[in-house]
Amino acid sequence: MYPQPSDSYVLGFCMGSLAAVAVSCSRSLSELLPIAVQTVLIAFRLGLCALEMRDRVDGCSDDRGDPWSTIVWGLDPQQARDQIEVFCQTTNVPQTRRPWISCISKNAITLSGSPSTLRAFCAMPQMAQHRTALIPICLPAHNGALFTQADITTILDTTPTTPWEQLPGQIPYISHVTGNV
């Protein structure tokens, strides 16, 4: 049985948000299929966009397959912002290679950046007191300074609107950022 709007909500994180929205716009599997195809194409184009950005930011470095994100426990977001600022001032990191906070949770944050910059940042003495773990995200994401509205427009301009126009939101979608429906 397909989820019903009266007793269901959908939620997705990062690329999973695309799948969640596709499910939310459908009342049945048969309605989901055309939207799912378009969603996969959007995800593919989004991945290509991130891949192109990775290559622009990091060039042809030897660490192209290395993670772009690390979880840091016990560092609050403001401390992270302050440490990022100090790091960037002392190392003269170009704007496109600055580390950024890509996710905030109750006990940890996720920092992202080019692999070499992320390694240098995590090697700072101020970071020694924090437990870190690299996570297998090998492309830049969640950075409004790197990605723009033009990137979104380019991705969506090649997406037919027909399946989406015919099936407006059915199942409530909960934003993983705000918690709002």
Image (cartoon, rainbow, N blue to C red):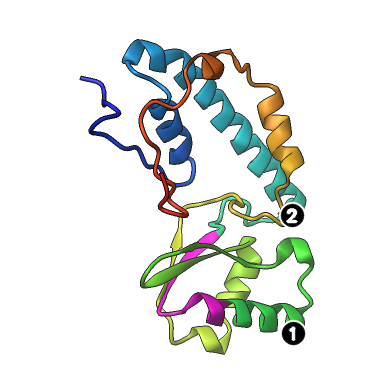
Residue at the image position 45 percent from the left and 32 percent from the top: 21
| Residue at the limit of the structure toward the front, as seen here | 6
CA separation in Å, label 2 and label 1 = 20 Å
Q: Quadrant of residue 115?
A: bottom right
Local crowd size for mark 1, using a 10 Å CA cut-off: few (<14), some (14–19), many (≥20):
few
Q: In which quarter of the image is residue 42?
A: top right
Q: Does the magenta stretch include residue 70?
A: yes
Q: Percent position (x, y) of residue 26? A: 39, 20
Q: Any mark on residue 57, and which?
A: 2
Residue type beneath disc 2:
Val
Q: Which residue is identified by label 1? A: 90
Q: Percent position (x, y) of residue 165? A: 55, 17
> Looking at the image, is 34 positioned above or below residue 82?
above
Residue at the image position 73 percent from the left and 51 percent from the top: 60
Whether residue 66 appears in this view of the structure is yes
Whether residue 59 appears in this view of the structure is no
110 and 148: which one is in front? 148
60 and 87: which one is in front? 87
> Looking at the image, is 126 positioned above or below residue 97?
below
> Range of the magenta residues?
69-80
